[in-house]
Image (cartoon, rainbow, N blue to C red):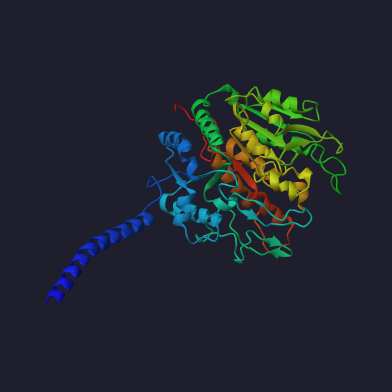
Amino acid sequence: MKKILVKIFIFCIIILIIVPYSNAHIQATNKNFLDKNKSSFDNSICDLLIITPSNFVKTLEPLKEHKNKNAIKTSIVTLDKIYDDIWYGRDKAEKIKLFIKKAYDETQIKYVLLVGNFRKVPIRYVNNADVNFHEQYFISELYYADIIDKNGSYSSWDTNNNGIYGEWNGDQAQDKYIDLYPDVCVGRLACRNNFEVKIMVNKIINYERNTYGKEWFNRIIGVAGDMYPPGSYSFPTPAYEGEDNILTDISYLSGFENTTLFASDGSFKGTEDVIREVNKGCGFLVFYGHGNPSVWSTHPPDDKSVWIEGLSVKTITKLRNNEMLPICVVNACHNLQFDVNIFNIFKQSFGYMTWIPECWGWKLTRKIGGGSIATIGYSGLEMTKEDKDSQEGAADYIDNSFFYNYGVNKIDILGEVWKESISRYLDKYPIDWNTPAGWDFSIDAKTVQQWVLLGDPSLHIGGIKNT
């Protein structure tokens, strides 16, 4: 009997120990479940979603505060949070895209700002390959912006489900009927460290606070020459393609003083001409020519053997335009190829310049004491109308559309101009996915896929009144 009483006593003690632990465990489990499923956003309605590594969050807080004060409801979400919430994505880039869709569905976001270079915030490479140009893949930030198709379903960009995105090789596209129309406005600050984050936060806040009503903003600088001198193609080309495009851009802007630096009239002879004019201040800076990740340049009239350099990653350091920051639109190859790094020297020819620490577009954007407030351009081989059999569209049309949407349609939010320019392009040149790679339709797709915005998509062009 005594043994039985001892056993009962021990059993009761065990129960007293286990029950509170079990309740606590259940409560903790429930709490974790609720934490997993509660909203990741600061507001039920969110305009701007900032996606960033956790170590950048503190530096980004002043930007969030500034945006919230100016009626742009802003949430910062870390990559760790995204990867924890979205367990079903195939890779980190898809997890980010699925999270953007979740935010779009739940909070009606308009803008997505990715903060971090390609090592910190993943990029999506698109395999729209033309064998004639030896570029198998390129960066596409549009991947993050096109989140639903015309039927409202998730737009994966991998319709044959083989892990290769935007695949277009051979006689027809393998990933067909990608929507391509951006549903949200996506920009990136390709920051490598907190120092660069702080630079960009200060530039954006100061621009929006101090630019409105300033005389310097109402000025556009256009730099161009003869993009395709005789012999560049098997057919005759216009004498001054780049210069003609700049005149089209200018025609869409009313109330803007224009300064043209043209090779045809001798006003553009080299880098010093560009630096001198940019240092006076301007609202827009436009280049039409040729490039790589390191430099932008063009030709004088009728001479393809001579190059006139505009700006390079080296000479950008000479800019002293302080807070008179333009939005730069650059029409050239690879100027915004922001995945450059030293290890590429073992992968590609030295002359491709993909081994440098940072690309032309990012160097211009994050420049201290000047440069641009944002830069828009191409991550890969930029195609112009001369590359198409139809001899129309391509980069010429989408870059012109930027100024049409700002000047004629009066859209004054940077990401909205980017978004509507892509939509305008696709309305004009719809894609036939059943045609060979390298034909006009694949060039049209590539044109919008590789058009990158390095900057804040919620930026109010020309600043905010009475901030």
Q: Position of residue 285 (x, y in %)?
A: 66, 32
> Which quarter of the rendered picture does the N terminus lie within?
bottom left
Say which residue appears at 20% left-offset and 63% top-offset: 16
- Report how many numbered discs are placed on residues in the image: 0
Say which residue appears at 42% left-offset and 45% top-offset: 46
459 or 28, which is in the foreground? Answer: 28
209 or 426, which is in the foreground? Answer: 209
303 or 74, which is in the foreground? Answer: 74
Left or right: 420, with 239 as reference point: left
456 or 412, which is in the foreground? Answer: 456
Q: Position of residue 142 (x, y in %)?
A: 59, 50
Q: Position of residue 417 (x, y in %)?
A: 57, 41
Left or right: 465, with 320 as reference point: left
Residue at the farthest front position: 2
Residue 230 falls in image quadrant = top right
Say which residue appears at 33% left-offset and 60% top-offset: 29
Residue 66 visible in the snapshot = yes
Q: Is residue 237 above or below residue 23?
A: above
Residue 381 visible in the snapshot = no
Residue 289 falls in image quadrant = top right
Left or right: 32, with 156 as reference point: left
Q: Position of residue 62 (x, y in %)?
A: 45, 34
Q: Is residue 289 above or below residue 349?
A: above
Say which residue appears at 55% left-offset and 46% top-offset: 186
Residue at the farthest left position: 1
> Which quarter of the rendered picture does the C terminus lie within?
top left
Left or right: 75, with 176 as reference point: left
